[in-house]
Amino acid sequence: MSPDISGLPLLSANLGFLKVLDDSLVAGFSFRSPISDMLDQNIAKVQLLADVLNLDVEFTSRYPGYPYEADSPLRNLYQQWFVKHTGQELRLEASHGGLELGIWKGAIPDLDIITMGPIHELIHTFNEKMSLASFDLVYNRLCAFLGELSDVA
């Protein structure tokens, strides 16, 4: 768990599928962590367990995360913009969910990242829903914020 953000996992492994293929039981897991070394250690433990149990294991992809940055100038700017345009304080939340921004952060380590998104329900199920009104709100706020950033730059 994160020492910086209460309740935020730093490492997880989710079972994605379990199926019988020919005469084998095949399980697919998704390992997630914003800390590469922690992810590497977990993968090594899985490999060791597979070796001890004489199981075949294959690692096919790696989904990069990115660690929480306590000092984020972009987050500070967005918080100020949000208060100015809504009259409300911005509620910050951390998520252990995978985001493609980890790929960007891996390629550009000094990149300052913030995320925002619409309201989702029942994520990764056949009943997943997204609020279109919240999508429009987030999209319009993002465009307005980026417009003001471009005026400053």
Image (cartoon, rainbow, N blue to C red):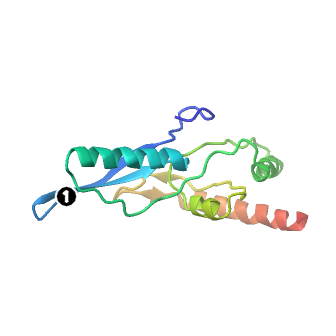
- How many discs appear? 1
Confirm whether residue 122 shows in the render. Answer: no
Q: Secondary structure at mark 1?
A: strand
Q: Is residue 71 left or right of residue 41?
A: right
The one nearer the camera, 16 or 140, is 16
Q: Residue at x 26, y 48 (%)?
A: 50
Which image quarter is the C terminus in? bottom right
The one nearer the camera, 111 or 36, is 36
Q: Residues within 10 Å of mark 1 (few under 14, many from 20)?
A: few
Q: Is residue 7 left or right of residue 87?
A: left
Q: Identify residue type, mark 1.
A: Lys
Q: Residue at x 44, y 57 (%)?
A: 129
Q: Is residue 22 left or right of residue 41?
A: left
Q: Position of residue 98 (x, y in %)?
A: 50, 54
Note whether 49 is above or below 110 in the view shown.
above
Q: Position of residue 36 (x, y in %)?
A: 53, 50
Q: Residue at x 76, y 42 (%)?
A: 88
Reading the image, the residue beneath label 1 is 19
Q: Residue at x 80, y 45 (%)?
A: 87
Q: Position of residue 34 (x, y in %)?
A: 55, 48
Q: Is residue 20 left or right of residue 127?
A: left
Q: Residue furthest right?
A: 152
Q: Position of residue 152 (x, y in %)?
A: 90, 63
